[in-house]
Amino acid sequence: MMETFGLLAHGLSVVLTPENLLLCLLGAVFGTLIGVLPGLGPVATISLLMPITFSLDPTGAIIMLSGIYYGAQYGGSTTAILVNIPGESTSVVTAIDGYKMAQQGRAGDALAIAAIGSFIAGCFGTLIIAFAGPPLAQLAQQFTSPEYFSLMVFGLVAAVVLANGSLISALAMIFLGLLIGMIGMDVNTGAARMTFGMIELSDGVSFVAMALGLFGVAEVICNLEDSASRALNSSRIERIWPTRAVLKSARGAIFRGTLLGSLFGILPGGGATMASFSSYALEKRVAKDSSRFGNGAIEGVAGPESANNAAAQTSFIPLLTMGLPTSATMALMIGALTLHGIAPGPNVIMRQPDLFWGLIVSMFVGNVMLIIINLPMIGLWVRLLRIPYRLLFLFIIVISAIGVYSVNNSPFDIYLMIGFGLLGYLLRKFNAEPAPMLMGFVLGPMLEENFRRSMLTSRGDLMIFLERPISLGLLFISALLLLSIALPSIRAGREDVFQE
Amino acid sequence: MKQITLRGSADLYLGLLLLLISGVVIWYISGLEIGTVRRMGSGFFPLALALILAGFGLILAIRGVLTRGIGAGPITIRPLLLILLSFVVFALLVDRIGLIFAIFAQISVAHFASDETKIYQSVIFGAVLAVLSAGVFVGLLNMPVELLP
């Protein structure tokens, strides 16, 4: 306990340098910005800014990139409440009651409760990382290659939950990602694999090009298709501090949303989006009068907004302690860490204490910055909503082109991004979500490496995965999870959550 | 804008796309050493993954033919082609005529991808973007790229 506080104090000393404070603020501002603007998500933005962080030290880079992620959770609610368009997928349910409240002239209440709930949840989630991270990492340190292989399998199976299309297409997306992850030089034999004779591919497919193509470019094209005018009429905000009565009625929902979100964030495949949906469903169930939901119930804003922010923080736990990404955004964080020469896993806490504790403290600092950025300065962000998409998309494509080019200073990566843009566009049209593909891509090389190592130690005996208790347990849970998604009755329940 | 509506279900097209990808991969990696489970060659994992992917593609294609699922979304040719083309233009030009003109070229192609763009806005915004990118990427971040021809 005391030890943790000592380490947090060390983290504070890391964050309190002008450079890291500035990066934290930049992350918070960028995050709010893309959260507010519909059609620009954290995945595209983080992959866009990743090349720029090359010149920074790894701690500062991760502080900024993660600030974008949790900052987007704050900003997303603003758009959802004021104009009924979710700025982020995590704010879809916030729009239901939040927008109703705005129409009733209670926009200020909704915005304030969303920000306060996010703040409380964000701080709580960060505390959980500080206290649960080190013991989990210690546990993970006992893992050898069979356990890692099973852990990766578990993570991939859970990623299926992320996609709301059909089970088969989500599984197919994972395997497509795994396959693309194989491109490049084979580490064991040095043979070039699937490079199609292109020397540029020998180091593998550029992560930035792939993420930006699948999410950035494909999204721009889809957004340009429906030329239904994006006229955004926002309601007026009168006062920004909620009355005591509003605070009191939101208290329980914030509390429940925080706990639920913290739990969902840790689970692979959970993530912030699932957390907010589940929280809304929970609030509706525990409410005395559930008919208020959909008509401007404050709990419908407080619960999901707390849940998505708590989950955004705690999803860093599996990443930093086991190297397991639980969502596409966390897969990007793995990419960012790897680019800086840090292998995500149980050794991060021991070998990179500056990074781990600095990141945790930066999350506290970032949450304080965010509540200031989002409450008193709300007017500024509302004005930003008036930027027409016909200008915004030009900005996005130019920055994408320069960003991808700058990774290797070669036009090759731009062509790669074009290819992935086309692929991402087609997948969307064919009702398949590209998010699980990114997970497969990141986990593919690790999956192969650990499988091959296991096979070497067991002399080709597949039973090794079932003989070790942790590995067996992980595979068993994965099988259960897969079964529960495949069974039609439970699947109908899953779709209910998405439709509610 | 003109749209192409694909007949049949989304599953069918997804299945065909996956079959195409896995087919190309299997054909291309046939030269790699497969090995055994005990001593895996470099081709073992890719081949296994490609075969599984082909299996999924086949299931999806068959399901798409047999059942009437969700149809494939309509494809709008103009934004698709012009946005992708605008990136090609940037990639072709950036090493030849410098960053600033490459940005202008990209925007002048992308301008026509939307019905809502206005020529004077795109020109002014393009100029702002070119100056800003030059300042941030080359001035601030020292990106090694020529600004002008």
Image: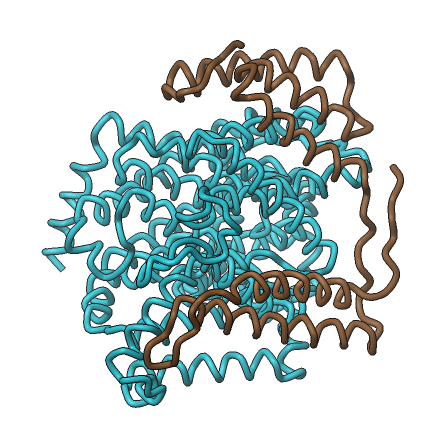
Chain colours: A cyan, B brown
Q: How many marks?
A: 0
Q: From this view, report whether residue A207 is shown above or below residue B149.
A: below
Q: Quadrant of the N terminus of chain A?
A: bottom left
In front: B19, or A464? Answer: B19
Residue A80 pos. (x, y %):
63, 44
The reply to whether residue A272 is in sight is: no
Identify which residue is drawn at 56% across, 52% down: A90
In front: A73, or A241? Answer: A73
The reply to whether residue A472 is in sight is: yes
Identify which residue is drawn at 41% across, 85% down: A476
**In this picture, residue A294 sits left or right of residue A445:** right
Q: From this view, report whether residue A467 is shown above or below residue A305.
A: below
Residue furthest front in the image: B31
**In this picture, residue A456 sits left or right of residue A462:** left
Instruction: Find residue A62 and report its image quarter.
Output: top left
Residue B146 pos. (x, y %):
46, 15
Residue A343 pos. (x, y %):
27, 54
Q: Quadrant of the C terminus of chain A?
A: bottom right
Q: From this view, report whether residue B106 is shown above or below residue A198.
A: above
**In this picture, residue B54 sits left or right of residue B131:** right
Residue A87 pos. (x, y %):
61, 42
Instruction: Find residue A9 and report its image quarter.
Output: top left
Identify which residue is drawn at 41% across, 63% down: A259
Identify which residue is drawn at 32% across, 27% down: A22
**In this picture, residue B32 sits left or right of residue A320:** right
